[in-house]
Image (cartoon, rainbow, N blue to C red):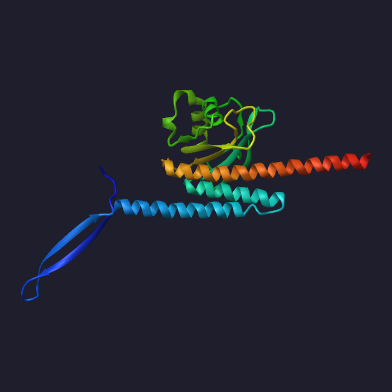
Amino acid sequence: DGSIVWGNATVSVVQDKAGKPKYLIGIVADITGRKVAELALRQQLEFQEIINEVLGRFAVGTDFEFDAAMVEGLKECAGIVSGEYAFILQPSDDGTAWIPASSWRAPDLTGLTAEHPCIPAGGCPWLEDKVVAGSIVVVNSISELPAEAANLRAMFEAEGIKSAVYIPMRGPVSPPHSSAGVTGALGIFSMTREVRWSDETIGWLRLLSQALCNVLDRHKAGERLKHSELRYRTLFEMA
């Protein structure tokens, strides 16, 4: 069927009575299962190392350092799936749009005209309904998009997007717009070629996206607390 098979070949020389080579006996054992298991284990260890490295970057104090760490985290996400553009979208406070919280783009990326993919609420209902419901959306090729995703297909064609994946991000508190607890989405675009991502790869990406979501939620909670403390301190000093 055209699939690659790993083999372990053993060859022995059979000699005649004079000690001269007479013929060879070869045995080939199929070790594909072992190689697949070894590769999966190696990828799992590499992915765990990526998660630890990404989360380690958030042990920072300033907003600038936090933003830089988030961009590096998105770069790692894009690297896992061979993407050139990665971003986090979150609903605006008034629920009228999905706005970018952070983004990373490959240095040589020129095909994407929009610096940040802000999506008006209801602008891509097929995509939005799936993400809000907590479903992962994988678009290996825009030709696979259904008729009801015409708006999304038009956007991809205009921007030159070949493949895309959207991973819902769930926060500690369910927002009013999503019964599934979706507080945002990680998106990755492939701009240079179509990519067919495996379920395993998407699973790893989902874990990393949730780690980024948790960090982002904690950062926002800390920011709200600082603003609240500042407001009450100002009111106290004015009293």
- Which residue corresponds to the image point at 69% horizontal and 42% vertical from the top-left? 220
- Which residue corresponds to the image point at 50% horizontal and 44% vertical from the top-left? 205
- Residue that sits furthest to the front in the current view: 172
Query: Which quadrant of the figure has residue 9?
Result: bottom left
- Which residue corresponds to the image point at 14% horizontal and 68% vertical from the top-left? 13
Q: How many labels does the image show?
A: 0
Q: Which of 224 and 126 is in front in this view?
A: 224
Residue 72 point in image, percent of width and height: 59, 51
Residue 203 drawn above or below residue 181:
below
Residue 108, can we see it? no
- Residue that sits furthest to the left in the current view: 17
Looking at the image, residue 84 sits to the left or right of residue 60; the answer is: left
- Residue that sits furthest to the top in the current view: 148
State which quarter of the image contains the N terminus: top left
Residue 199 point in image, percent of width and height: 42, 41
State which quarter of the image contains the C terminus: top right
Q: Which of 143 and 121 is in front in this view?
A: 121
Query: Which quadrant of the figure has residue 96?
Result: top right
Looking at the image, residue 22 sits to the left or right of residue 175; the answer is: left
Residue 165, can we see it? yes
- Which residue corresponds to the image point at 51% horizontal and 52% vertical from the top-left? 48
Residue 148 drawn above or below residue 157:
above
Residue 99 point in image, percent of width and height: 64, 35
Q: Nearer the viewer, residue 168 or 157?
A: 168
Q: Which of 45 and 186 is in front in this view?
A: 45
Residue 12 point in image, percent of width and height: 17, 66
- Residue that sits furthest to the bottom in the current view: 18
Residue 145 drawn above or below residue 49:
above
